[in-house]
Amino acid sequence: MVKVVGKKLGRTICYLAFLAAMVFAAAGMPSRVMATSDALERPEVFDLRDVNGFSYISPLNRQGSLGLCWAFATLEQAESLLMLENETPYDEAAVRFSVRQMDYATSRNGISGYDNEYATNRNLGGGGNFYMASFVMAEGVSMVAEENMPYDTDTDGKKLAEVLSFVGSLYEVENTAVIPPMMDKELFVNTIKDMVMTYGGAYVGTGSPIGACGVKNADGTYVIDEESDCEGSANYSGHGMQVIGWNDNYEYSYCKSGSDHVGANQCDVPVTGRGAWILRNSWGDDASLAYVYLSYDSVDADFAFVTKVAAMKNRNWDNNYHHNPFEEPAYARTEVAEFTKKLPGGEELTKIKFMTMNYGGVYNIKVEADGKEYNVGAVETEMPGIYTVDVTEREIKINSDDFTVIVEGDGSSYLLDDAVMAFTKNTDATPVIKMADVDLGAEATEFDEMVYFETKNVPSGEAMELSLMRNGVDATELLNVEDNVVAVNNALVKVKIGGDLAYGGYILTASYGGKSYQTSIQYGEAMHGDVNGDGKVSSADYVKIRKHIMGTETVSMRVYYDAADVNNDEKISSADYIKIRKYIMNGGEL
C-alpha cells in the first residue's frame, strides 16, 4: 500500500525552491521512543561557537544568488558532528564540505548529457531539503572536500567525472534522525537540545527571518516565530539554517499585520514569548542576519541530524544500487519498499540502507538472490530517518543474476517509497565495460556523440583506452576522445570519428586492466548480402549467415540482419545462404 504524503507538501526552501518538509505520523507516537536522556545536563544557554572556549562550527558562508541554504545547513551539520565526534574544535585544517558538488549531484541539469541517477526534481542552483541531501550523502557521493569543487555561482552543467566520483568523497552517511513537529512542546525542545549537544548543530527547515514569520526584535536581532497564520502568508519564504544552540532567557515580541509579523510598536497588544534557538544563517557576516533566533514556540519547524558517518577509505563495498525516490515532487510513503537489480558479475551484499517515515517502528528485511531467500531480520527504529544494516556476516552472494532487497513495516511503520539502497563488494575482479551497439541509419554524416559506458572493477578517476576499427582495418587515427575518465561505475565519453563518415561497420573498443570490450557502430544502409559491413559481398558473408543458421554465431544488429535477409522474408534462412552463394559464383543481382 502506498500513501502520498500530505500536509506540508510544497513548502519551499530558499525562495521558490522545492519541497522542503514531509509529514510523518507523530500523533499517537509511543512516548518511550522519544524519551530524552536524564543524564544530559541542559544549560539555560548553549552555543557551539563557545564550548569551554572552543568553537564546534565552521565559519559563516554566503550562498549569494543561489538557493542552496538547504545544502549549506545539511553539510554544516555534518561538519559540526565530525568536530564533536573527534573532539577537535574548528581550525583551519578542519574539513569543509562542498555545497556546489551536492548541488550538481542532485540537480536534473547539473551533469551535461547524463541521465543522473541521483537527480531530484530541482534545477541547478535551486532549492532542496535535508532528505534529498542525506540520500546522496548515504550513497557516498556528496561529502566531498570544498577544495574539490569550490563555491561559485556558475549554473552550467559539469562533466560526469567532475561531479560523481569516489575519489574525492570522504564519508558516507550511515544514519540520520528527523524530528518533525510534536504535540508535546517540552519533549520536542528537550529532544532537540540533547541532540544538538550530541550530534552538533541541527538542520532546521523554517521561514526566512525577513519573511512573513520573521521580525526585527526590540534588541535589534531577528527572530522567527513560525505559526500557521504566517505560513499561509504570501510573504512566507522557506529557508534552511543550522541550529547552533539555544537561549532559554531570550525574550521577543512582535505584532501581527494580517498574517505577517511586524514590529511590536505597531499594535496595542503584541505577541510575546521567551526562549529561542540560535540559528546560523548562510547570508554572510551581516551583523543582524548572520545569526538569528527561532522561538521555541515554532513547533511547526522541521529539525534533522546526521547522526553517524563512516570514512569512505574504510568502506566494505565497491558498488551501490538504488532507485531514485526524489525524481518527482510528490514523495510517497509505503509499508513495503523493495529494490531489484541484475548484476553484471559476481558480487556480495555487504549493507542495506533504508529511509523510515514515522516515529518508532519495526521493519523486517529479506533478500532474494540466486534462487535463495535470506531473512536478514527485524530492525527496530526510533525516529524517522536513514538506517543502515550491515549484512557482511550473512555472506549473501549474487552471481550475475537478479537480486531483490525487501524492507517491510509492521503494519503501522512506513518507509519513503523507493528509498532502499543496496551496497555490494565485487567477488570477481575482472574489469567490465559495457556500451550499447549503435545504428546510425542512412542519413548520418558524422559521429560526434556522448557515449555512455557502464563499468565494473574500474576505479573512479581511472581512464579507459579507446580504439577504432572500420571494416576490419585499424582506424584509431580517426578517433577523437574526451572525458574518458570513469566516475561512479560509469563514464560519459565524448567520442568523435573524424573525416567523412564512410559507410560500413565500426568497432569501438574500450580497454582497461588488460581487458577489452567491443561495441558496434554501424553507419548507413547495408547492401544486400554485405553481412559483415565491409562494403562488398564475398564468401565471408555467406559464412556468417551459415553460422547464424547453425546457431554458432548470431547476426544481431538490425542493419546486418536486413543485409542477410536477401529474399526479404524477414528471417535469415538457408534460402538467403543459397542466394548469396549463387551470386558470388555466377554474379547477377541479389
Image (cartoon, rainbow, N blue to C red):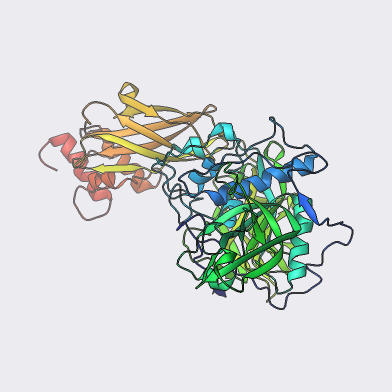
Relative depth, front residue between 456 and 252:
252
Q: Is residue 331 visible?
A: yes
> Residue 415 appears at what percent x and percent y?
63, 66
Quarter of the image where one finds residue 579: top left
The answer to whether 466 is drawn above or below residue 12 in the figure is above
Q: Is residue 379 visible?
A: no
For the C terminus, give its image quadrant.
top left
Taking the image as shown, residue 288 lies to the left or right of residue 108, namely right
Residue with the most extreme bottom position = 28
> Residue 496 appears at what percent x and percent y?
31, 31
Residue with the most extreme top position = 477
> Residue 207 appears at what percent x and percent y?
56, 60
Instruction: Please name the residue shown 41% across and 31% down the image.
Output: 509
Instruction: Please name the residue shown 67% across and 62% down the image.
Output: 252
Instruction: Please name the residue shown 73% across and 66% down the image.
Output: 188
Relative depth, front residue between 72 and 107:
72
Quarter of the image where one finds residue 249: bottom right
